Image (cartoon, coloured by chain):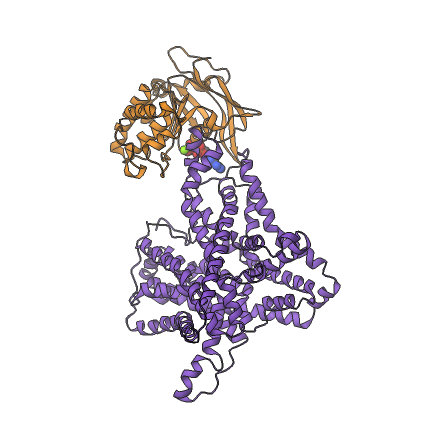
Amino acid sequence: MKDVAILCEGISKRYGTVQAVREVTLALERGQFLALLGPSGCGKTTTLRLLAGFEIPDSGEIAIGGQKVSAPGLFIPPERRRIGMVFQDYALFPHMNVERNIAYGLSRGPEQAARIQEVLELVGLVGLEKRMPHELSGGQQQRVALARALAARPEVVLLDEPFSNLDTGLRVRVRAEVREILARAGATAVFVTHDQEEALSLADQVAVMLNGQLVQCASPEEVLSPPGEPPRSAVRRRGQPTARPGLRGVCTL
Amino acid sequence: MATVSRPFQVPRPISRSRSQRRLLPPFMLTLPALGVALGMLVPIVYLVIRAASAGERAWLLLLRDRTLSVFLQTVLLAGTTTLISVLIAVPLAWLLVRTDLPLRHFWTVATALPLVIPSYIGGFTVAAALGPRGMLQKILEPLIGVQRLPEIYGFPGALLTLTLFSYPYVLLSIQAGLRGIDPSLEEASRSLGHGPWSTFRRIILPQLRPSIAAGSLLVALYALSDFGAVSLMQFDSFTRVIYMQYQASINRGFAAVMSLALVALTGLVLYSEGRTRGRARYYRSAGGCNRPATLIRLGRWRWPALAFCGLLVLLALMMPLGVMIYWLVQGLSNGEPLRLVWSAALQSIIASGVAAVAAVIAAVPVAVLAVRYSGRLSKWIERSTYIGHALPGLVVALALIFFSINVVRPIYQTFALLIAGYTVLFLPQAVGAIRSSLLQISPRLEEAGRSLGRTPRQVLATITLPMARPGVMAGAALVFLTTMKELPVTLLLSPIGFQTLATRIWSASSEAFWARAAAPALLLVLVSSLPMAFLVLGDRRWRS
Ligand SMILES: Nc1ncnc2c1ncn2[C@@H]1O[C@H](COP(=O)(O)OP(=O)(O)O)[C@@H](O)[C@H]1O
Ligand SMILES: [Mg+2]
């Protein structure tokens, strides 16, 4: 399974009486983009946070880049999971400039400066190294967040509603840019959205969530499949991940 | 109206409490925080031990009539002080925040400033000015031939002093509450046919209840634990009786028993306030979204309003300042040496500086734990710091004396014990300041740090603490200032020969050497009023 970036098997998470995530099983191939799509409160953020290691699942197993990071009796903390995270509000460190924000995830050394330049070029922000976060526009802040997440070459990049903080005019453009940047970096990405159009236009795989469960997991074309035809994933049994012909990503229920 | 804004919105803590399987706090936080909590428990636990071993006689003394009268007098003093403070503060706050009172900003600062005058300085100025043959009598004698003013010592003097110098607590609390009220509620009430008075009574006052309660709590605790004013005014409330019992050293067990009774009283006040307090502690306005309310025109009413403000500032600010300046000049012309004042000031600064650092160091793990790792343990650890609120300074000092004499003799009468006393007393302030600045930091930032490969400890050092620096500094400044003014702990725990401004003022004024007390008192008040003015002014600038 060398080329599977993320593998989750039956992960669940409950908060008090709320079952936020229920038996979610999914797999994602390296280099693919997965969209977690669903209405607000359906458990998308929680799923992402379970992947990142900010929450401990009640049950189930998670592997990232072939390494088990979460299983009964095993919990690898977020800093050792090789993930990059782009937060909804970007979470740029307000007391550090752009350069130091990006350097934060890099080990000190001769390559550090070069890598910072590299990712700045990648996101098109060369020249803004010394700006403080509040001196940047929303779109620029987002690109800094992306650069910071990509700098240490993480196994997967996790993005929580990455475009919800941008106004509509900007959103479509930034979306395309982000996709372009991630693709050029050769990254594997999981992003959360409640916007169907966004999911369909950006992702290779769309996982639809409802009430904490994955109800459909398919390519954008299949998600758009004509009404009347039952979503094929609904009849698929949960269990062993199976690669489906025609799909490069693996995603099962 | 679609959005019914709650009157005193609790700023939503950004951290969500996580149930089920949660991430455990690292040991490097839990261990020091546990240590702090245990340290906070020492005075109260040892007080109980000491009182329990005080012997039957001490407990029987508690049942005497005199003890009952001390209890009643204390309650009467605290209750009346609180009531009058509220009666002053409610109309004053309304005038300052909601009306076009002339010179509003000046009055806002001037009416808050009495807060910087410690009760023992206030007490001495009240006695010097209004005593039977005090300065007022000297002014009145040639005019209308008054030979003697009525006695000020006892209940009237204690009540006057405590009210004049503690009402700003309620005032500030109510001002904040008033600013937080959505002006459209008021407009709605007016549009529904209610006049200004009816609107105030039916809409504003009910919403102010939590801030009135929060401020009253502070005043009541202030009055219950005050030592300086009641001693100078020779009013037998708990603290004075305990102190005399201790000084006489006939029956120190009885002092411990009485202390415990006083703690029960403060604990009762805190407890009965508990429910309102949870909400009222954060009476912050909903923020920038509120339109500023239109000011109410006072018209002809501005004259009585001005007279009210003027009289208050005259009594609570001008009178003490006038008395101090008068006696300073008297003292200087009689050759009162200033040299000792400078050395006392230096000792004050050293003690306060060390106390501020100690309190902040102790507060950081507690605050981080409370904000980021909510759980039963961290809640109890945070609660343990409230002990500093409930214990009067005199009681903390006595408990630490008993403890050091009987358990760790080598620290008795050392600087370290003094600092420990200050830390126990003022830790809640430091925790509060750090806590509120931590609440402003989104946990997402810390998670971003973790996702970028840093350990919890590194994240604490590179993100959380640098961002919480304003809170840490504010906490340190607060502890510094309150330590400068603190009296009973300083008096009882200072090593021999260690004289601060507070102890100097105390020893001079308890023997009515007004001229000797004036210089250090003025210095202390000036030093502590600078940051206070910034606080009030800064608050105003931020709002406008
Ligand atoms: N820390 C928490 N404590 C309690 N309930 C939570 C917590 N986080 C999320 N939930 C609940 O779990 C469910 C899923 O939340 P979330 O994953 O944030 O949804 P989404 O991101 O899809 O909008 C919601 O019902 C939410 O209220
Ligand atoms: Mg979400």
* Quadrant housing the C terminus of chain B: bottom left
x then y, percent, for residue A190: 39, 24
x%, y% of residue A40?
Answer: 40, 33
Q: Would you place residue A16 above or below residue B543 in this image?
A: above
Q: Residue furthest right?
A: B56
On the image, the x and y values in percent for residue B224 come to: 55, 64
Q: Residue at x 58, y 42 (%)?
A: B377
Image position of B393 with respect to A249: above or below: below
Q: Judging from the image, what is the letter of the chain drawn in purple?
A: B
Q: Residue at x 49, y 60 (%)?
A: B218
- Chain ID, orange in image: A
- Give the residue drawn at x 56%, y 73%: B234
Q: Quadrant of residue B58?
A: bottom right
Q: Is residue B106 left or right of residue B153?
A: left
Residue B333 higher or lower than A8, as above or below: below
Query: Seen in the image, is B143 located left or right of residue B46?
Result: left
Residue B527 sits in quarter: bottom left
Outermost residue, bottom side: B145
A199 lies left or right of B396 = left
Residue A240 lies, with reference to residue B365, above or below; the image says above
Q: Is residue B473 visible?
A: yes
Front residue (pair B100, A112): A112
